[in-house]
Image: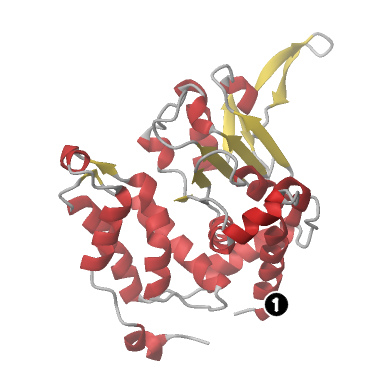
Amino acid sequence: MNENAYERALLVVEEVKKAVTGKDACIIKAFAAILAKGHILIEDVPGVGKTTLAIAFSKAMDLENHRVQFTPDVMPADILGFQMYDKETGNFVYHPGTIMCNLFLADEINRTSPKTQSALLEVMEEGGVTVDGERYQVPKPFVVIATQNPKGSAGTQLLPESQLDRFMICMSMGYPDKDSEISIAKGKSMKKNAKEVECVMGREELLELCKVVEREIYVDERVYRYIVELAGATRENSYIDLGMSPRGTIACTKMAKAWAFLQGRDYVMPEDVAEIFPDVVKHRLVLNTKARVTHISEAAVTEEILSNVHQPASYELKGIYRG
């Protein structure tokens, strides 16, 4: 593996840590999703640094970022843009929406209407928008980081399964540890720390890193089989109505490769898959009545699946690892 590429990636992680303290695992998983060309859903209570995390990544990698606070009155045209008639030319001219950026922060996405939520479906899957029959591509790299309040919070609406499936991972940041919260209480706010983040990587270099992850990280056949068996287990579990889709299988593979890269390896270990699997599958599961009645959570079901599906032993694969 290109050692320089790995070292450059670590510089980004270190810069983001300046803004978000005590959440190293969350930072690395979010960066892994970015390197895997995926979108990120962060589900958590307000005020734990979700927005700060997104802004820190945009500053560290010189990404043009736009933030939209999703409320019931936000319309699809605010996101996608619109056509307006120009008297001078006699033509309709496209006025870009907020989606035309490298990093789009959809804050509290589950507080807006389903109509506006669905405006993101096309661009998250295909990297472009269609307005009045005309197609417009978003800049590259492009990533959506969406935040949502926990299910059942006042004024929220559930995202449809088709949209949830377009997010590569769904993670939770949680409350800061005691030491980090003491620093916050002393006035060292997350917003102030975010101003200290410096640009250490350009957009083109980020695109090159994405290519390294995609092309140079090796996945053995037995690891592929392990990923597919985990996906199949979600479709057969007695507590699950809707299991992981093939898109989820692809996301799990890409995410495992990016995670392995950020661990300094050019190959994926079964442990990498087990580490990222809960974040990849959490938002893709629809539990049935049996699970709700017995108070079984997505996390508990995921843990059960990881326990029941045979994980290849790393020592069995060492002979085929490269590098």
In the displayed structure image, the side of residue 128 where residue 272 appears, left or right: left
Residue 251 at least partly seen: yes
In this orientation, which residue lies closer to the viewer: 66 or 190? Answer: 190
Up the image or down, 78 lies above or below 277; here it is above
Instruction: Tell me where residue 25 sits by quadrant.
Output: bottom right
Residue at coordinates 39% horizontally, 91% vertically from top-left?
Answer: 319
Where is residue 168 shown, x and y percent of the image?
46, 51
Instruction: Tell me where residue 314 sits by quadrant.
Output: bottom left
In the displayed structure image, the side of residue 293 where residue 159 appears, left or right: right
Residue at coordinates 50% horizontally, 37% vertically from top-left?
Answer: 148
Quarter of the image where the N terminus is located: bottom right
* Residue highlighted by disc 1: 4
Question: What amino acid is at disc 1?
Answer: Asn
The residue sitting at the bottom extreme is: 319
Up the image or down, 266 lies above or below 228; here it is below
Up the image or down, 80 lies above or below 260; here it is above
Instruction: Tell me where residue 133 sits by quadrant.
Output: top right
Residue at coordinates 59% horizontally, 20% vertically from top-left?
Answer: 74
Q: Label 1: few (<14), some or many (≥20) within 10 Å?
A: few
Where is residue 128 shown, x and y percent of the image?
58, 37
In this orientation, which residue lies closer to the viewer: 247 or 240? Answer: 240
